[in-house]
């Protein structure tokens, strides 16, 4: 079995265990591997434009706000923007700060006909450390995966 298939199998197993309404859940490293090996795989960063600019974002991510800063109002155009930027047959890996908004976005996309939707566990910044800071304990940044800022 190829590494890609092993990753997808683990993601599907997590979906069953966690009773997720979408295809699966991935660690940041697994998500990065899939992005490198599956040509139809897209990373969808659903954080706010402020987070993209000031905190950073993974390289080559499709950026669509789930909620907008300030106030964190829901983006009423999320599905329309998703349809304009990715194909329903693409494998979509949703990412936010810690995994909550991306879970919601993956569920909505799956309910609207996207065949492969995955949540990236830990998100971009991950959990807080003892000093209350993110980006050092876990998540995309802490794992040393490619990203840029500003």
Image (cartoon, rainbow, N blue to C red):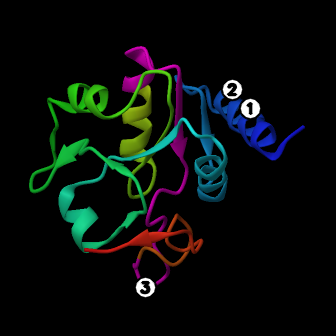
Vertical order, 117 against 149 (above or below): above
- Dividing the picture into quadrants, the one containing residue 77 is top left
From what the image shows, is residue 19 above or below residue 105?
above
Q: Is residue 12 left or right of residue 75?
A: right
Q: Residue at x 59, y 71 (%)?
A: 143
Q: Residues within 10 Å of mark 2 (few under 14, many from 20)?
A: some
Question: In front here: 108 or 149?
Answer: 149
Give the magenta range: 108-133
Identify which residue is drawn at 33% across, 70% down: 56
Distance in Å between CA atoms under marks 2 and 3 = 35 Å
**View extreme (right): residue:** 1
The answer to whether mark 1 and mark 2 are in CB contact below 8 A is yes
Give the image location of residue 93, x and y in percent: 50, 41
Disc 3 element: loop
The quarter of the image holding the C terminus is: bottom left
Q: Earlier in the sequence, mark 2 or mark 3?
A: 2
140 versus 87 height, above or below: below
> What label does residue 131 carry, if any?
3
Q: Residue at x 40, y 79 (%)?
A: 133
């Amino acid at each position: 079995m190829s590494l890609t298939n092993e990753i997808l199998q683990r993601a599907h197993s997590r979906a069953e265990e966690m009773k997720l309404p979408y295809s699966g859940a991935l660690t940041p490293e697994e998500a990065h591997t899939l992005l490198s090996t599956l040509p139809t795989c897209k990373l969808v960063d659903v954080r706010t434009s402020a987070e993209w600019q000031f905190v950073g974002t993974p390289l080559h991510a499709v950026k669509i706000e789930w909620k907008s800063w300030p106030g964190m109002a829901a983006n009423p155009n999320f599905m329309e923007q998703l349809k304009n930027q990715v194909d329903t047959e693409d494998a979509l890996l949703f990412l936010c700060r810690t995994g909550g908004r991306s879970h919601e976005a993956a569920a909505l996309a799956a309910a609207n006909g996207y065949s492969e939707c995955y949540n990236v566990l830990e998100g971009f910044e991950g959990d807080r450390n003892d000093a209350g800071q993110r980006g050092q304990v876990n998540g995309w940044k802490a794992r040393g995966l490619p990203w840029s800022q500003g």
